[in-house]
Image (spheres, grey):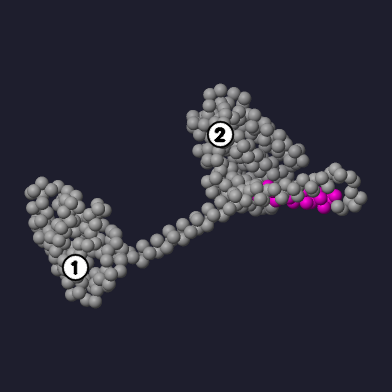
């Protein structure tokens, strides 16, 4: 804290206002030599021990002498449009303020930069002459340094993540090509296209190679899609899309898996819905991921349905299942990349609905759906209840709907 006399500064400010200068800051930018009058016009009368420590002075006397010495005008750059701290305070006091809070960098007596927050107040009863002004200074240099370190670390992490995503996106062709060859040759061997296999184990091994390769290709495709989105390289190819037709196409793709589990697929998408201006490939992928999840987590004999409705805020597509559901504590994690929720089976579940603990997959499906629907300006909502089922709803904004 310092005790200061600003009466001489007030006289200069009053003289300027009498000459018609309303904005002293602007005037000083044109006449920076005025600082040579304003700064010495403020006389520091006293300072406490904390102020001495903050400004790294050897003693209070050294601090007072430094504060009351003529200013170094070489540090003032009128081209920046910034006013000296004294000018800012004079301006605001002249406008009737009696308490001003400011913060920013300042110089300690040893030449180091400190970051301070000041509160400068005209003492009660001295508003007419500014004869006594109290200023408190809070030093937050250490906190400022910590904040800057965090910002640097955050930027480095973001740069590293961006580099990873860009690398994976560029590696798309190099990763997929050899896997497609593995899948193709293993399928030829498995189906004995070039002739019968005399040793049955070889055929079984070919099936294992094909299944493993397919799983690895799915994982790589998911990784690459997510990486392209994160790297900002996924571009939507928008066109007019008939939603019922897309839903029918996707339901045919998941039908074989549904038949294996005796899961009934049902579509309630009306044929009179407006078309959408969306990316058909991305929309098929979103629906395929959601329907595949619904079938995967629905026990034998269950049901998966798709319906859509048009509302004032846009068009919603809901995928409902009678599956094992998601607990409230896990519902917030479903969109996390690689999140695979483990399930436990409460005793109250019917036998056919007992959740299994693990399911195949990459844990990226819902993350990709969320990213793709947000690229369309929409959102995804998940509602679920353990043992009852889950509803995932894609909501496309109204501006993406087109007249039939």
**What residue do we see at 46% from left, 61% from top?**
153
219 to the left or right of 230 = right
Label 2 Cα crowd, 10 Å radius (few <14 / some 14-19 / many 20+): some
Which residue is painted at 48% across and 59% down in the image?
A: 156
Is residue 319 covered in magenta?
no
Task: Where is residue 189? Give x, y as percent.
Answer: 83, 47
Asked which quadrant contains residue 46, the reply is bottom left
Q: Which residues are magenta?
A: 203-220
Above or below, 305 relative to 174: above
Q: Residue at x 49, y 31 (%)?
A: 399
Left or right: where 93 falls relative to 290: left
Q: Main secondary structure of the magenta part?
A: helix
Report the Cα–Cα distance between label 2 and label 1: 66 Å
154 sits to left or right of 369: left
User: Quick one: 323 or 200, which is closer to the camera?
Assistant: 200
Q: Residue at x 10, y 51 (%)?
A: 16
Front residue of 191 and 6:
191
| 1 lies above or below 158 | below
Within-10-Å neighbours for mark 1: few <14, some 14–19, many 20+: some
- Can residue 20 be seen in the rendering of this structure? yes
Q: Which residue is mark 1?
A: 67
Determine which residue is flagged by label 2.
238
Circle number at residue 117 = none
Q: Residue furthest bottom?
A: 58
């Amino acid at each position: 804290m310092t005790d200061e006399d600003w009466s001489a500064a007030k006289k200069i400010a009053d003289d300027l206002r009498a000459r018609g200068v309303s904005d002293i800051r602007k005037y000083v930018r044109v006449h920076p030599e005025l600082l040579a009058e304003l700064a010495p016009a403020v006389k520091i009368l006293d300072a406490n021990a904390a102020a001495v420590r903050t400004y790294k002075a050897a003693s209070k006397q050294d601090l007072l002498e430094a504060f009351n010495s003529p200013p170094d005008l070489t540090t003032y750059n009128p081209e920046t449009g910034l006013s000296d701290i004294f000018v800012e305070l004079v301006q605001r006091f002249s406008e009737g303020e009696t308490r001003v809070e400011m913060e920013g960098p300042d110089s300690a007596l040893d030449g180091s930069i400190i970051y301070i927050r000041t509160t400068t107040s005209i003492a009660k009863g001295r508003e007419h002459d500014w004869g006594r002004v109290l200023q408190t200074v809070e030093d937050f240099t250490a906190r400022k340094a910590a904040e800057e370190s965090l910002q640097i670390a955050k930027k480095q992490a973001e740069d590293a993540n961006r580099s990873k995503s860009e690398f994976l996106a560029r590696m798309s062709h190099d990763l997929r090509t050899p896997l497609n060859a593995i899948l193709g040759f293993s399928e030829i061997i498995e189906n004995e296209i070039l002739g019968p296999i005399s040793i049955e184990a070889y055929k079984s091994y070919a099936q294992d190679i094909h299944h493993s390769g397919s799983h690895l290709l799915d994982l790589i495709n998911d990784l690459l899609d997510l990486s392209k989105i994160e790297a900002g390289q996924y571009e939507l190819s928008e066109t007019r899309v008939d939603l019922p037709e897309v839903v029918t196409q996707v339901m045919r793709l998941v039908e074989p898996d549904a038949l294996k589990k005796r899961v009934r697929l049902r579509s309630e998408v009306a044929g009179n819905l407006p078309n959408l201006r969306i990316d058909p490939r991305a929309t098929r992928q979103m629906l395929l991921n959601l329907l595949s999840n619904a079938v995967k987590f629905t026990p034998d004999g269950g049901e998966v349905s798709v319906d859509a409705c048009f509302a004032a805020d846009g068009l919603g597509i809901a995928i409902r299942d009678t599956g094992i559901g998601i607990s409230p504590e896990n519902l917030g994690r479903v969109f996390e990349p690689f999140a695979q929720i483990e399930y436990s089976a409460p005793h109250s579940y019917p036998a056919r609905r007992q959740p299994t603990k693990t399911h195949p997959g990459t844990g990226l499906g819902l993350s990709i759906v969320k990213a793709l629907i947000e690229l369309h300006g929409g959102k995804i909502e998940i509602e679920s209840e353990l043992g009852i089922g889950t509803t995932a709803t894609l909501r496309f904004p109204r501006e993406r709907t087109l007249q039939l």
